[in-house]
Image (spheres, helix red, strand yellow):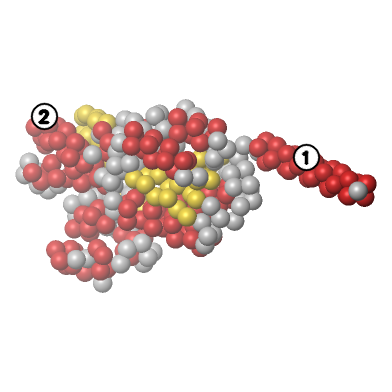
């Protein structure tokens, strides 16, 4: 009997010691606020995108991010949600993702101020947040992956100014910004204004486009055509959607030739407009570059290995990529030779002859 008691005592002592070790291990893990998956090789990652107005999120960002995550972590699960320009919906999607046990959240915010609460909530539960494309200024995330948005705005504006000067254009420009609730749009806006400033072309009027809605951009530009008419030498639009809306307004008003209009995102429709001469420029920021970079960052957090930023923006470790301005002069080299789109995707029907004229076959 005494032997059994001694054995039980030893076992009890071992169990207590093991319990103590487990407690120490748990405490150590919790002390690392950016540890994410604590060395996990699998888990759920939320990929929360902002809207359907830009076709890129459905056609490029989501599939490219998911494909890279599958390559890095075959046992991981990507939970993709699109908020369709509704910040409340995005908040609900984030809450749902957290309830489903995600270990990392990649977030492209609808409303970058409202989304600060998503960051705070996730971080309070030791879930790292990677802001994607749009920064959250008020609350530092764990990492930020994007192209240089201010640089994008400045590049498309300077490209337009160069075109206007080369053409000997007279008059001023309209500036069509992105959403007022998007901090990335505010960076693009800052860059666009810097690109026009001192150019000799006055800003006739400027508009912040709610929800990046192309129709709202079109409606506003229609009003400006009525007011300024032939004084409009060009339009600096913040993305391809607002650029497309601007061009639609010009065409509906019978403005010929259509003055140069900028864009950003290199959507298929924008490349078609560039090929046909309706849109002057766009920005090639290969979504594959940022989507795969975001996947690598998310996987680093999942493993408990917080990635180091290449720079810091808004108190957040960041990785910012440099984009390329695309016009008719380099569309073949950048878009087609670069493998972003194929001839079959772009040079359909009405665009076949324009593509052929540019040597795109």
In contact (CB < 8 Å): disc 1 and disc 2: no
Residue 315, quarter of picture: top right
In the image, is 279 to the left or to the right of 265?
Answer: left
Name the residue at the bottom extreme. Answer: 361
Where is 47 relative to 135, above or below?
A: below
Q: Residue furthest front?
A: 1
Q: Residue at x 11, y 29 (%)?
A: 227
- Using residue 106 as the reference point, say whether residue 20 is left or right of it: right
Is residue 56 at least partly visible in the picture?
yes
Q: Residues within 10 Å of mark 2 (few under 14, many from 20)?
A: few
Give the mark, 1 or 2, whose residue is nearer the N terminus: 1
Q: Based on the displayed image, in which of its 4 quarters is residue 109 positioned?
A: top left
Q: Which residue is mark 1?
A: 20
Image location of residue 120, percent across then percent down: 50, 31
Observer-nearest residue: 79 or 254? 79
Q: Secondary structure at mark 2?
A: helix
Q: Residue furthest right?
A: 2
Residue at point 32%, 47% (across, down): 264
Q: Residues within 10 Å of mark 1 (few under 14, many from 20)?
A: few
Q: Position of residue 269 (x, y in %)?
A: 23, 55
Is 52 on the left or on the right of 13, as rendered? Answer: left
**Which residue lies under the disc numbered 2?**
227
Q: Residue 238, position in %: x, y?
A: 30, 40
Quadrant assignment for the C terminus: bottom left
For numbered disc 1, what is the local secondary structure?
helix
- Looking at the image, which residue is at 26% across and 33% down? 210
Which of the pair 116/332 is nearer the observer?
A: 116
The image position of residue 351, as x and y in percent, is 18, 63
Q: CA distance from mark 1 to mark 2?
A: 76 Å
The answer to which of 273 and 212 lies nearer the viewer is: 212
């Amino acid at each position: 009997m005494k032997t059994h008691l001694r054995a039980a005592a030893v076992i009890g002592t071992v169990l207590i010691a093991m319990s103590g070790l487990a407690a120490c291990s748990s405490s150590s893990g919790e002390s690392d606020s950016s540890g994410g998956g604590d060395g996990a090789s699998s888990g759920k990652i939320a990929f929360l995108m902002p809207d359907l107005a830009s076709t890129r999120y459905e056609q490029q960002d989501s599939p490219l991010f998911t494909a890279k995550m599958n390559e890095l972590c075959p046992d991981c699960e990507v939970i993709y949600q699109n908020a369709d320009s509704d910040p409340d919906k995005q908040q609900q999607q984030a809450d749902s993702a957290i309830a489903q046990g995600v270990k990392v959240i990649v977030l492209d915010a609808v409303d970058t101020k409202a989304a600060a609460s998503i960051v705070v909530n996730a971080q309070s539960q030791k879930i790292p947040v990677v802001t994607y494309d749009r920064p959250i200024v008020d609350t530092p995330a764990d990492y930020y992956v994007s192209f240089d948005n201010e640089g994008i705005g400045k590049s498309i504006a300077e490209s337009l100014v160069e075109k206007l000067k080369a053409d000997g254009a007279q008059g001023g420009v309209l500036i069509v910004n992105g959403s007022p609730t998007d901090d990335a749009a505010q960076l693009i806006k800052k860059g666009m204004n810097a690109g026009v400033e001192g150019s000799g072309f006055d800003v006739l009027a400027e508009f912040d486009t709610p929800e990046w809605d192309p129709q709202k951009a079109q409606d506003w530009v229609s009003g400006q055509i009525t007011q300024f008419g032939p004084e409009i030498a060009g339009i600096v639009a913040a993305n391809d959607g607002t650029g497309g809306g601007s061009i639609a307004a010009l065409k509906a008003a019978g403005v010929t030739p259509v003055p140069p209009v900028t864009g950003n995102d290199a959507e298929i429709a924008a490349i078609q407009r560039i090929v046909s001469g309706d849109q002057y420029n766009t920005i090639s920021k290969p979504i594959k570059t940022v989507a795969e970079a975001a996947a690598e960052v998310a996987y680093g957090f999942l493993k408990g290995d917080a990635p180091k930023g290449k720079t810091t923006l808004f108190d957040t470790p960041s990785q910012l990529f440099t984009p390329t301005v695309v016009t008719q002069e380099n569309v073949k080299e950048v878009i087609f030779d670069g493998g972003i789109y194929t001839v079959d995707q772009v040079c359909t029907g009405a665009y076949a002859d324009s593509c052929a004229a540019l040597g795109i076959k």
